[in-house]
Image: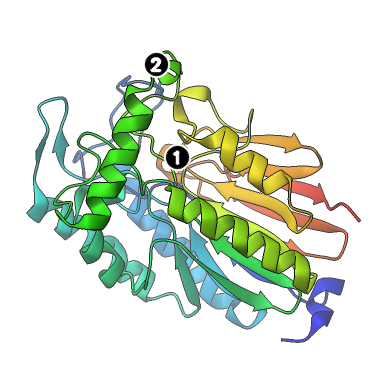
């Protein structure tokens, strides 16, 4: 792909910016108020058809786009709260139903792991979505680097089913326990079981990727599920170690933007000239609307062209 894409000849990449299709559970649209929902209707049954329409839209523009990204919660998962009784077979069936629609998209697909995704085994999720790891980096075109983060890697309670009892997961559990039990975190609004954070190991990887990008002269866009930029999402939905991750990002000259899902109402924050965008969820769209976007990258700006509920934005880049 030639560098003329940054001059507006075509897009650098596409984002399907939804935080959750949630196709089957429950069987009809509901209007309940669990924490953070505040009475908004969640339209589970309608979401799958909206994904199908988005897939047609993407395929019609496949020669003009580099990839499609989904920002987590590909399913809702069948889980009885607060009793904590998962129904793996039902969650697996939901995953297969949604994944088959993603299979029809004739572009590279980038999947972010969300908290609801983990109502199936993590290894099963990644294998079905043909994703080799839960966090990784790639270069869609010269001069740009995309970092895919896993803000669910460190989690607690019922978020992740069938977590393997191996050395790595014992380390992650210890990190979760240390954060959760720390007195200074006891009253933080984001100390919620639906949130999580990146591990120390992943944070080291993030620092190294940003450092390498600086040395190459690349610009970096990151994707994740939970908000990390202060003010870009409601506090009860922020990544546990969002302050530390944000600091790492904005301390890098290479970093320009972070896009995430999780907080369905969306949000935005400019932090020291860098952009943190929480995209609106298709799950809560009005019946006749959708929620996805095309993202075009230029030398001096990023343009998010929202479709339906998803907000359009022009994000100026620091020189």
Q: Is residue 196 above or below residue 214?
A: above
Q: Which residue is mark 2?
A: 183
Could you tell whether 147 is left or right of 145 in the image? left
Q: Is residue 162 above or below residue 176?
A: below
Is label 2 in a helix, a strand or a loop?
A: helix
Q: Residue at x 43, y 20 (%)?
A: 185
Q: Is residue 20 above or below residue 268?
A: below
Q: Quadrant of the C terminus?
A: bottom right
Question: Residue reaching furthest bottom?
Answer: 1
* Quadrant in the rendering for residue 300: bottom right
* Quadrant in the rendering for residue 15: bottom right
Could you tell whether 253 is left or right of 51 in the image? right
Callout 1–callout 2 Cβ contact below 8 Å: no
Is label 1 in a helix, a strand or a loop?
A: loop
The circle on residue 262 is 1
Asked whether 133 or 257 is in front, the reply is: 133
Can you see residue 71? no
């Amino acid at each position: 792909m030639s560098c003329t894409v940054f001059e507006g000849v075509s897009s650098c990449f596409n984002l399907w910016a939804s935080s959750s299709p949630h196709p089957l559970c429950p069987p009809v649209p509901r209007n309940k108020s669990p924490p953070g929902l505040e009475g908004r209707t969640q339209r589970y049954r309608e979401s799958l058809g909206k994904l199908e329409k988005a897939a047609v839209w993407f395929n019609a523009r496949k020669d003009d786009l580099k990839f499609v990204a989904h920002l987590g919660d590909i399913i809702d998962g069948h889980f009885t709260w607060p009793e904590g009784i998962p129904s793996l077979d039902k969650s697996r069936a939901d995953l297969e139903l949604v994944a088959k629609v993603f299979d029809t998209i004739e572009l590279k697909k980038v999947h972010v792991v969300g908290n609801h995704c983990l109502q199936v085994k993590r290894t099963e999720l990644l294998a079905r979505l043909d994703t080799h790891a839960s966090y990784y980096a790639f270069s869609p075109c010269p001069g740009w680097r995309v970092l895919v983060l896993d803000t669910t890697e460190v989690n607690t309670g019922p978020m992740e089913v069938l977590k393997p009892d191996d050395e790595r997961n014992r380390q992650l559990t210890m990190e979760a326990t240390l954060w959760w039990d720390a007195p200074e975190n006891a009253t933080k609004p984001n100390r919620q079981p639906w949130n999580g954070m990146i591990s120390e190991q992943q944070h080291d990887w993030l620092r190294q990727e940003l450092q390498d990008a600086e040395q190459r002269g690349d610009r970096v866009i990151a994707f994740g599920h939970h908000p990390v930029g202060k003010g870009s999402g409601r506090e009860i939905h922020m990544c546990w170690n969002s302050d530390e991750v944000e600091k790492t990002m904005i301390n890098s000259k290479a970093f320009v933007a972070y896009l995430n899902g999780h907080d369905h109402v969306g949000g935005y924050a400019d932090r020291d000239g860098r952009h943190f965008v929480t995209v609106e969820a298709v799950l809560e769209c009005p019946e006749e609307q959708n929620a996805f976007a095309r993202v075009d990258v230029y030398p001096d700006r990023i343009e998010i062209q929202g479709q339906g509920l998803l907000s359009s934005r022009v994000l100026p880049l620091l020189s």
